[in-house]
Image: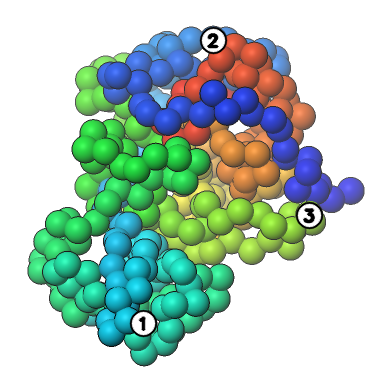
């Protein structure tokens, strides 16, 4: 029997949505979930150290959030238009997939002007998505975007970005520009915690997946098997693939930090749990009864009802048990979503 969208629903009291991060990075709670015994532990994020062993691998997504939300106006009419940059297209020019709003007012051939840069609308891909090209490239483009762009906070935070978000909505290990949203499980890690993890003999591996529309586009069909994921760009180089494969072949565990990391690993997975190096576009959609091949443990935040992310976690931990864990988290007052608390699923 196929699962339905309604099978992944739950009710979250609005006051549990974390609209701001904790005062200090890493001061988050950690719900530790044991899949084998179906047991739970209420811990703090720093307690992660107690669950990793020498020889394990911690896989991080090193994508960096860009100031992707731009406010401009239509050349000529002056009508206000918001542009959300999703993904840079390959090539020397600054061509981007983007969402525009109001979508109907950004027609093919029109120019959208900003304070220090402008772009032309080249294609309409439907559902508000456009292909746009800017009139500046390289360093000039990034300098302009840094001046006018805003941090692309998720809409459920229901507030404008603030100065502190420039730091807090970014992981401490972010180096590769290109994401329209942070890999939020990584927001809990401090440089000090990562060093402590390495001192325990854990090796850190890095992947890149530029989080975009694929992760956050809502599922709108009741039969989830008919949902189509939008593509997101990923990369895993040979050095980091070797780190992961060495651990897998030695019977050590791979801890995937975040659903974006899981997507990348499973896109490149072999049947034996090893991975290939490579880069490209992934539209993998992970939901029950999919069996994950690479991660032995997942560190993740609490996700929206009916989202592809809670479906992925359900594939790893089981749907009914996942929802029981969410019920426990709600009862215990855990903070939810991007700036919220974390889960460690073992």
- Element type where label 1 sits in the image: strand
CA gap between label 1 and label 2 equals 50 Å
In the rendered view, does 1 fall on the left or right side of 120?
right
Front residue (pair 9, 196): 9
Percent across and percent down for residue 197 are 31, 20
Q: Is residue 91 visible?
A: no
In the rendered view, does 288 fall on the left or right side of 139?
right
Q: Who's the residue at 56% across and 56% down the image?
A: 217
CA gap between label 1 and label 3 equals 33 Å
In the image, is residue 190 above or below residue 124?
above
Front residue (pair 297, 129): 129
Percent across and percent down for residue 246 are 40, 39
Task: Determine which quarter of the picture holds residue 60.
Answer: top left
CA gap between label 2 and label 3 equals 34 Å
Q: Which residue is mark 1?
A: 121
Report the quarter where the C terminus lies: top right
User: Along the polypeptide, which appears first: circle 1 or circle 3?
Assistant: 1
Q: Which residue is mark 3?
A: 222
Q: Who's the residue at 65% across and 39% down the image?
A: 305
Q: Which residue is mark 2?
A: 42
Task: Determine which quarter of the picture holds residue 309.
Answer: top right
In the image, is residue 156 above or below residue 57?
below
Percent across and percent down for residue 303 are 56, 36
């Amino acid at each position: 029997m196929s699962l339905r969208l309604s099978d992944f629903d739950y009710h979250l009291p609005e006051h549990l949505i974390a609209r701001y991060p904790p005062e200090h990075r890493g001061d988050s709670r950690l719900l530790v979930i044991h899949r084998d015994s179906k047991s739970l532990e209420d811990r703090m994020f720093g307690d992660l150290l107690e669950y990793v062993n020498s020889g394990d691998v911690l896989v991080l997504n090193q994508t960096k959030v860009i100031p992707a939300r731009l406010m401009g106006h239509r050349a000529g009419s002056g009508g206000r238009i918001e542009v959300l940059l999703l993904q840079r297209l390959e090539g020397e020019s600054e061509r981007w997939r983007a969402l525009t709003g109001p979508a109907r007012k950004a027609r093919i051939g029109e120019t959208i002007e900003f304070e220090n840069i402008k772009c032309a609308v080249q294609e309409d891909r439907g559902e508000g998505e456009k292909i746009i090209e800017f009139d500046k490239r390289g360093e000039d483009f990034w300098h302009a975007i840094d001046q006018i762009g805003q941090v692309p906070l998720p809409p459920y935070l229901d507030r404008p970005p603030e100065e502190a978000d420039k730091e807090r909505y970014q992981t401490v290990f972010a180096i590769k520009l290109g994401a329209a949203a942070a890999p939020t499980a990584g927001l809990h890690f401090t440089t000090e915690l990562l060093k402590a993890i390495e001192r325990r003999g854990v090796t850190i591996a890095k992947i890149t997946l530029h989080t975009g529309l694929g992760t956050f586009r809502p599922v709108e069909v009741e039969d989830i098997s008919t949902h189509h994921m939008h593509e997101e760009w990923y990369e895993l180089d040979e050095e980091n693939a070797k780190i992961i494969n060495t651990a897998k072949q030695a019977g050590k565990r791979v801890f995937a930090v975040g659903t974006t990391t899981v997507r990348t690993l499973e896109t490149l997975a072999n049947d034996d749990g090893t991975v290939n190096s490579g880069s490209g576009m992934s539209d993998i959609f992970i939901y029950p009864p999919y069996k994950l091949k690479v991660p032995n443990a997942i560190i993740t935040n609490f996700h929206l009802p009916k989202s592809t992310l809670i479906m992925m976690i359900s594939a790893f931990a089981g749907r009914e048990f996942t929802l029981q864990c969410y019920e426990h988290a709600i009862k215990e007052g855990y903070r939810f979503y991007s700036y919220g608390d974390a889960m460690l699923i073992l």
